[in-house]
Image (spheres, coloured by chain):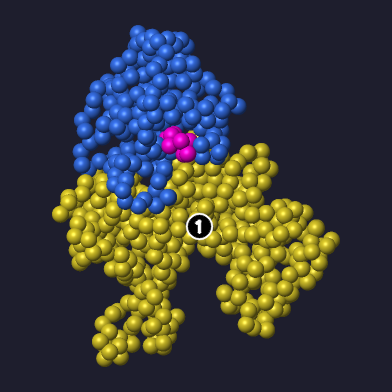
Chain colours: A blue, B yellow
């Protein structure tokens, strides 16, 4: 796996968030991370979940000014249509999330794009779940995006052993997977898109 | 027969229970719960007579209570409302017997007829200040019922404010729950922040008390013993002032604008406030600031002053203004969390359901605006809103909790979280 970037201008904070999102894919989605790439102010993490569905998570940079957050999220929600993945999420630092307007959230919902809140201390919360997408033909990427900056990542952020992006074991039967279970059954609205599904599914004995 | 995964099973057979002071709401996953009154009727001596008709019950709960009322001579002695302000005494055997019967009734009417059913994953919600023994008794009751009917695969208990936050889809927030007898302020950030919970010994009962005093002043002293009469009057005429002093001044300058006549439908009883329209604001204000000087004369003439709450080393004044109580709770929370908590204050409970009549918007406000204004006076920007579904939000939160909490998390008394499970605990 490598981190690809047009320009190596990622902040240390963004790289930290990338790690948290990778941990989210590995620990919460019980999947694996295949690739991390960066373009302008957007970082994209590509992987698969435990069922083999392809995930794409775009991080809204911590450097985006507050006044520009809604514009950026809306822009990315539209751009998401071009992403080659079954589930698309935008990840946003928690300190920016509170500036997202109701209408922006509605646009995300209309586009089937999920939203992940990333805290500076490492927690991630799936604020809105992503809907399974019917793929559109994907445009080939510009060669400039393909430049690999893996050495820079390893210099700046040491990945703890437990955040390894190696493929984890598949989830056992007794692990709650609320966002994927029995989608054919009628689920009430108050359950759908409820961020607590993600928060509570990570509870461990003893309040951990 | 298809064998379901644990997660699928848990979602299909998630079950919620909301033990409220006046109502018990229960049921499996769906759009809304079944609601019955939180009360039960002991048949007592009448059982001998009823046995002649083949009725063996000791306690009746649910809609059947009404059927038996006629057969009981002393209703007030036999009809038991088990909870007082969301709590039950440890040794109150009769009340616990009612809770057991209500819980059993819930499973009886909800039990699915599917072949794969082997018990519900039950989340019960109790008051945030419920002591450990209430948790223990609920576990015992569910274990007992499971032994009889195999209807509880696992059970857990959560505080009601956490359930409200879950139903509101808010992970970091402050839930202010105000019922008839008390008000609880619970900051939440993925978990309830237990050491920051502040409980006030006041609620709708204080608004009832001031409404009763007003009725006495208006010449209806003989009627105030009827709780329902007082409550109807309170709900019909009570207003929350934007600012009490300004509202009283406006009402005295222009009494016609605030005059109101309250009439009990189907009777000749009419209460006319005429030039005393300003009193309407006292009913709403007492919820938020019973420390205002205008209430002193009422305390002096016998209206009960809200009792102080002792919480460990802290004593919270019973009359502490609500915004100060919110501040008190949040003073025990990390400053990093404060902006997010002030940004999502959720008001829950019937005591916050105050309307603003058309044309009085300049002087009257709803509960959310009242608190937002109060915090703004203290220099705090906040976002305050009333829970979207006041009736069912606790039950909804309990259902989500049943679905989401992993099956392998076992009950832990320290964190007060996890499943109390068949095969492990009973």
- Give the residue pinned by disc 1: B390
Q: Residue furthest left?
A: B1
The relative height of residue A61 versus residue B251 in the rendered view (above or below) is above
Q: Is residue B100 visible?
A: no
* Front position in the image: B341 or B105: B105
Would you call the spot at circle 1 few (<14 residues within 10 Å), some (14-19), or many (20 or more)? Answer: some
Region of the chain picked out in magenta, as a range: A108-115
> Looking at the picture, does residue B37 appear above or below residue B350?
below
| Nearer the observer, B91 or A84 | A84
- Provide residue B28's location: percent of width, then percent of height: 33, 59
Q: Is residue B96 above or below residue A180?
A: below
Looking at the image, the residue that sits furthest to the front is A137
Residue drawn at x 52%, y 53% as measured from the top left: B388
Residue under the image location 70 percent in, 64 percent down:
B280
Which SS class for mark 1?
loop
Q: Position of residue A70 (x, y in %)?
A: 56, 30
């Amino acid at each position: 796996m490598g981190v690809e970037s047009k320009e190596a201008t990622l902040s240390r904070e963004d790289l930290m968030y990338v790690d948290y999102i990778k941990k989210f894919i590995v620990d919460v989605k019980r999947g694996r991370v295949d690739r991390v790439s960066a373009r302008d102010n957007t970082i994209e993490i590509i992987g698969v979940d435990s069922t083999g569905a392809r995930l794409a998570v775009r991080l809204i940079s911590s450097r985006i000014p507050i006044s520009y957050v809604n514009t950026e999220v809306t822009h990315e929600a539209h751009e998401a249509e071009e992403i080659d993945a079954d589930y698309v999420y935008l990840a946003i630092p928690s300190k920016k999330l509170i500036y997202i307007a109701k209408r922006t959230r509605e646009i995300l919902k209309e586009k089937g794009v999920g939203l992940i809140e990333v805290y500076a201390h490492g927690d991630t919360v799936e604020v809105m779940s992503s809907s399974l997408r019917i793929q559109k033909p994907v445009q080939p990427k510009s060669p400039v995006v393909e430049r690999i900056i893996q050495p820079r990542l390893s210099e700046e952020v040491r990945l703890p052993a437990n955040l390894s992006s190696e493929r984890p074991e598949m989830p056992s039967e007794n692990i709650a997977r609320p966002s994927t279970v029995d989608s054919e059954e009628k689920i009430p609205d108050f359950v759908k898109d409820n961020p607590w599904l993600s928060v509570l599914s990570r509870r461990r004995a003893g309040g951990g | 027969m298809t064998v379901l995964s644990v997660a699928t099973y848990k979602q299909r057979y998630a079950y919620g229970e909301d033990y409220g002071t006046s109502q018990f709401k229960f049921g499996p996953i769906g759009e809304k719960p079944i609601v019955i009154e939180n009360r039960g009727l002991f048949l007592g001596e009448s059982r001998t007579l009823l046995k002649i008709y083949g009725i063996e019950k000791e306690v009746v709960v649910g809609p059947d209570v009404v059927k038996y009322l006629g057969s009981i001579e002393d209703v007030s002695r036999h009809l038991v409302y088990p909870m007082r302000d969301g709590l039950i005494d440890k040794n109150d055997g009769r009340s616990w017997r009612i809770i057991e019967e209500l819980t059993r009734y819930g499973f009886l009417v909800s039990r699915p007829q599917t072949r794969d059913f082997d018990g519900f994953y039950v989340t019960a919600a109790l008051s945030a200040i419920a002591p450990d023994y209430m948790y223990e008794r609920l576990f015992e009751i569910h274990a007992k019922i499971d032994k009889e009917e195999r209807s509880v695969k696992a059970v857990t208990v959560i505080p009601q404010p956490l359930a409200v936050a879950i139903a509101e889809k808010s992970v970091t927030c402050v839930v202010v729950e105000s019922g008839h007898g008390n008000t609880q302020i619970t900051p939440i950030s993925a978990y309830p922040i237990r050491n920051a919970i502040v409980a006030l010994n006041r609620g709708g009962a204080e608004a009832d008390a001031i409404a009763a005093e007003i009725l006495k002043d208006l010449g209806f002293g003989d009627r105030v013993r009827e709780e329902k009469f007082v409550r109807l009057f309170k709900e019909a005429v009570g207003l929350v002032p934007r600012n009490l002093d300004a509202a009283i001044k406006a009402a005295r300058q222009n009494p016609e604008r605030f005059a109101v006549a309250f009439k009990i439908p189907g009777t000749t009883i009419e209460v006319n406030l005429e030039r005393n329209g300003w009193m309407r604001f006292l009913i709403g204000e007492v919820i938020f600031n019973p420390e205002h000087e205008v209430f002193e004369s009422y305390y002096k003439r016998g209206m009960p002053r809200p009792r102080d709450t002792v919480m460990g080393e802290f004593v919270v004044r019973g009359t502490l203004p609500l915004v100060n109580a919110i501040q008190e709770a949040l003073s025990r929370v990390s400053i990093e969390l404060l902006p997010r908590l002030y940004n999502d204050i959720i008001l829950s409970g019937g005591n916050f359901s105050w309307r603003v009549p058309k044309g009085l918007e300049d002087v009257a406000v709803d509960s959310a605006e009242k608190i937002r204004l109060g915090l703004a006076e203290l220099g705090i920007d906040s976002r305050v809103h009333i829970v979207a579904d006041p009736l069912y939000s606790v039950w909804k939160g309990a259902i989500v909790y049943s679905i989401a909490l992993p099956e392998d998390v076992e009950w832990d008394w320290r964190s007060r979280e996890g499943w109390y499970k068949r095969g492990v605990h009973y």
